[in-house]
Image (spheres, rainbow, N blue to C red):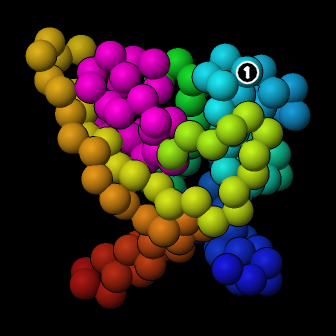
Amino acid sequence: MKPEKRAQIRKQFVREFCKGAKLQRATPEDFARSEHEIDAGFPAAYVSFLKEVGSGVIPGLAQVDGMTLLSPLEAVATSRKAWEAGMPRNLIAIVRCENELLCFRQARPGQRRVEDGLWRFQWAPGQAGHAGHAGWAFDSFDECLQDYHDDVYERDEEE
């Protein structure tokens, strides 16, 4: 994806969904600590978004999907819980939406893949014996942001 298109998608997402958000920007130290803990690198698109915009509950999507963009440290903690629930260990959670996680595949620490696909892992935290299910979700982090933007406009047109 061209940088101009990526910037446009992010501006739309922030304008539509992040009004009034109390998002916390991530620091290089947050990423370094998290990558060290899980021995994996985060995708460049996620890193830059969290450094520029931040992580936290996305107000414009909280009522629809309960969407929370996880900080690097939350991503580590959430991934560990999901691994115990049966999520493949090569997936790292970066977004929590009610009973599903959006995840990326592990990369080497410090490796920055710009276009990294996202996987969906459906689970029920706290339910004993629930193994969960993983499947393909998006071609990239920015495609995910674009998809939420497009879905809102489709819902608005249907109403």
Q: Quadrant of the C terminus?
A: bottom left
Instruction: Name the amino acid type tagged 1.
Output: His
Q: Is residue 90 one of those drawn in magenta?
A: yes
Q: Nearer the viewer, residue 84 or 102?
A: 84
In this rendering, position of residue 57 left or right of residue 119: right
Q: Position of residue 132 (x, y in %)?
A: 20, 33
The part of the chain drawn in magenta is 79-104
Q: Nearer the viewer, residue 98 or 74?
A: 74
At x 45%, y 18%, the residue is 80
Q: Nearer the viewer, residue 120 or 66?
A: 120
Q: For the residue carrying disc 1, how many other residues have a C-alpha within 10 Å: few (<14), some (14-19), or many (20+)?
A: few
Q: Is residue 43 one of those drawn in magenta?
A: no
Q: Position of residue 64 (x, y in %)?
A: 34, 53
The residue that mark 1 highlights is: 36
Q: Which residue of the protein is positioned furthest toward the bottom in this rendering?
A: 157
At x 63%, y 43%, the residue is 107
| Above or below, comparing residue 61 to residue 4 in the picture | above
| Above or below, comparing residue 120 to residue 94 in the picture | below
Q: Is residue 22 visible to the viewer in this orientation of the structure?
A: no
